[in-house]
Image (tube, rainbow, N blue to C red):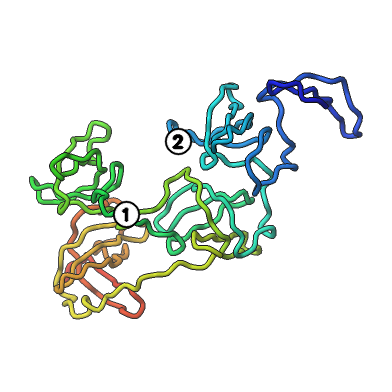
Amino acid sequence: QKYLGGGKYNAVWVDDRGKGDEAQTLGPGFIRKRLADVDRAGPFLAGEAVEGYLEEGQQWHPGIIQENHQDGSFRVIWDEDATEHTLVAKDMKKIAPRMELFDLGPGLRMKATINSIRDFGAFVDVGAVREGLLHMSNIKQTTRPMNAPAFDVGERVTAYFDDDMRWHPGTIDSMNGDGRFNIRWDEGGDDAEVFACEVKGIKLQDERRLPFKVGDRVDVWVAKVEERAGRFSVSMFEGGRRGPTKPRDYSAFESMDPTVSVTGIIRRVLDMGFVVEIQAPTGARETGFVHLSQIRDHRVENVAEYGRVGDEVDVRVVTVDVKGQKMSLSMRPIY
């Protein structure tokens, strides 16, 4: 009914018949727009319900926008304890009715929240009734500045340990002033030992850097909608087009003797087998797939029992499909 100042309003409750009740004063945190009236694509406005991301706990929390500071930040009151917090637009997403898949169309630009990251891409929330798929081929690759370090703190890597002459998985813990990086091994949990390693003895586990992490908000375009299947995909490339892909060259591996084993490094552990990186006689490096039937002579129930990311394994090149850009490997010996 009336704005009283200080974030307070006089409000009259209205029942289903439109009949009003006695006026009541409501203060900050106790009044918001009806969700049906929220413009999901519009700017953030005072009174709108949002979810805000807190880096400290790496979680989203519900709240209500109280004020636009006009500097790109907003004052939000949390639902759970009525405390205030200042957030910027990239750390907020509106709470509004979820869109049906028929409301989406190819080329539609949207804001997406990264919900989870998988080997093949990421699942995102654009405010629809279902999550969308952001496939790896539709993710923009990061461009590192010329003066950027070889690795960033927190990146997952495999590193070579001189004492046992093996590669082990770990995380970049910090950077040394002498050009080396301190790595915290996976083995040992929170009490794991930190080891200083030179750049040449470190490799990214996934061989790629993503331009986001779980919880980040990114711009995407709807790429494809399949209503009958109940799914849709999005792209980081304008208009929803598929991103450019660089062909992988397996020609250097065609001449490798299928009876001779070479040393490879496990890059991924999947339910159906290992993705293993090997080097050809020319020095070229590529990954091939070891199907679970090619891990041991006997039946393999759990692939993870036979190797971890970063482990060195002996493999043979079984088949090479240059046109199809793939290679089959085997860990089974030839008797």
Tell me the mark number nearer the camera, choosing from 1 and 2.
Answer: 1
Identify which amino acid the numbered label 1 is placed on.
Arg
Q: Furthest residue to the front?
A: 70
Please tell me whether residue 88 is drawn above or below residue 300 in the rendered image: above
Identify which residue is drawn at 90% across, 33% down. 18
Q: Which amino acid does the dot numbered 2 rest on? A: Gln
Q: Nearer the viewer, residue 141 or 304?
A: 141
Which mark sits nearer the N-terminus, 1 or 2?
A: 2
* Circle number at residue 19: none
Quadrant in the picture for the N terminus: top right
Where's residue 224, x and y in %?
58, 65
Distance between the alpha carbons at the discs numbered 1 and 2? 25 Å
From the viewer's perspective, tell me whether residue 326 is left or right of residue 17. Answer: left
Determine the secondary structure under disc 1: loop
What numbered label is drawn on residue 144?
Answer: 1
Q: For the residue labelled by badge 2, is the local secondary structure a helix, a strand or a loop?
A: loop
Name above or below for residue 30 compared with residue 121.
Answer: above
At 66% from the left and 25% from the top, the residue drawn is 29
Q: Looking at the rendering, which quadrant does residue 78 occupy? A: top right
The reply to whether residue 303 is in sight is: no
Q: Position of residue 195 (x, y in %)?
A: 16, 39
Position of 51 compared to 284: left or right?
right
Q: Which mark is residue 58?
A: 2
Circle 1 residues within 10 Å: few <14, some 14–19, many ≥20? few
- Residue 50 seen in this snapshot: yes
In the image, is 288 to the left or to the right of 9? left
Q: Residues within 10 Å of mark 2 (few under 14, many from 20)?
A: few
**What residue lies at 31% left-to-right and 62% top-to-bottom?**
292
Contact (Cβ within 8 Å) of mark 1 with mark 2: no
Residue at figure coordinates x 19%, y 76% from the top left: 258
Quadrant placement of the C terminus: bottom left
